Amino acid sequence: MNDQQQQQQPKTKMSTIYLNQNAGGSWSEFFGDIYSGIAVGIGHPKWIVEKAIDQGVKAITSLTGMASSSSSADSSSNNSSIDNGKLDGSLKVIGVGYGRTGTYSLALALDELGFPTLHTQHLYENQKIFTHFVDNIFYKSIQQDEVITPDMYTPDFDLLLDGGFTATMDLPFALYYTQIHEIYPDCKFILTVRENSEVWFRSWDVLTKSITQPAQYGSFFFTHVNRLNYYMRWLFSIVNSDKTYLNAPFPLPPQNKARSISSYEAHNQKVRNSIPSSHLLEYNVREGWEPLCSFLEIPEANCPSTHGIPFPKSNSARAVTWQAYSSFIGPLVLTVFILFSVFSLVFRKVTGMSVISWCLFVKAKFMHWTNESLKERTKRNKNKMGMKMD
């Protein structure tokens, strides 16, 4: 890897909302996980809503006859962005570890080292790449009720370069190490692992339970969420070695622990057997910067550890759980707020009063009626007592 590439240090995703550098087990780590989880979780539906609004605006524009000029401008803008974003050469680093092995933290670290990295968590934001996988692998598997495995189809990996990426992390890219090694022989591979298979499965199980419910309800309202649902079904079928997930009704079957662990361990062993040791690093993110910088031939002077920069820590099981909560509850709260706002406007138009003023008015009337009822009841009781005394 040349010096110019090593000197590049774009920080495309390095953001404080994703990082939690606090000491393990501390209260600051606990609240840091919650904060980062909520921030990231809200970010997903925010992007989806913005995309839906953008598509709606384009649809309205096309109906008003302004489509040709705007579309040509968009086309030229997109083409120029692709030309500027496409990187010469080839893919440099591929993460070949299963999800929940520290892949997001490593993606942030690679960004810091100058390797623009596409992580699965941001796959849906890159429409050309995501659409390619959905149309040719995920959705096609569901249509055929047969899992399209890596040995059955080779994706167009140049789309990653077109998008400005030189590295990837997490599934699905982690499954295509054989094809990528053949196409890009100089590419390096990092196999992220956990302490043991039990630890991995616990984290994987938390993730799957967290994302299935938002996918179940969100897919009814947003096309993008439905496409993520296709990916999730394909992914679960791969990891569990069970095509039942492709077309099973919601709620999806739970993860099969024995099959998942067997799949995880078999994948790791196949990677070790397939990739030359000179191009493979087996790595736990707890090891920090040093082995990573050494493997990627980053000079010691340029390694972040030399400058006291902590290794990114992100996407813990707790943070993932809060991501799921916020990605589901956030849009729900927003929807209720919008509906209430519309109702308030219509209500004011019809009654001439705000909802709050009407509530206060009704409350005052109710209190007045209650007081009058109490007075009347007290009066009747007094009259009855007087009659008895007589």
Image (cartoon, rainbow, N blue to C red):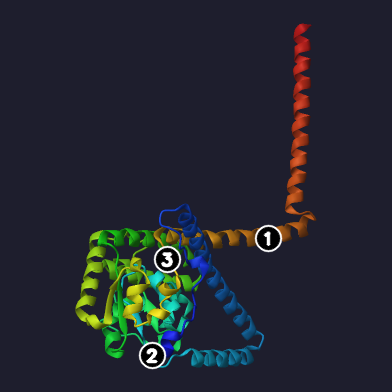
Q: Which residue is mark 1?
A: 341
The answer to which image quadrant residue 137 occupies is: bottom left
- Residue 66 shows in the view: yes
Q: Quadrant of the N terminus?
A: bottom left
Task: Identify the residue position indicated by label 3 in the image.
Answer: 313
Residue 2 marker: 2
Q: Is residue 253 above or below residue 136?
A: above
The disc labelled 1 sits on which kind of residue?
Ser
Q: Secondary structure at mark 2?
A: loop
Q: Residue at x 45, y 70 (%)?
A: 308
Helix, strand or loop at mark 3: loop
Q: Residues within 10 Å of mark 2 (few under 14, many from 20)?
A: few
- Categorize mark 3 by other alpha carbons within 10 Å: few (<14), some (14-19), many (20+): many
Q: Residue at x 71, y 58 (%)?
A: 344
Sequence-wise first label, 1 or 2: 2
Q: How far across and down, in percent of the image, does residue 101 sit?
A: 33, 67
Seen in the image, is 41 located left or right of residue 241?
A: right
Which SS class for mark 1? helix
Structural distance between the alpha carbons of marks 1 and 2: 57 Å
Marks 1 and 2 in Cβ contact (< 8 Å): no
In this view, the mark in front (1 or 2): 2
Q: Nearer the viewer, mark 3 or mark 1?
A: 3
Spot occupied by residue 224 in the image (x, y as percentages of width and height): 48, 73
- Give the amino acid at mark 2: Asn
Q: Which mark is residue 309?
A: none
Image coordinates of residue 126 in percent, x first then y, are 47, 80
- The quadrant in which residue 142 appears is bottom left
| Residue positioned most to the top | 390
Q: Determine the CA span between mark 3 and mark 1.
A: 40 Å
Q: Position of residue 127 (x, y in %)?
A: 47, 81
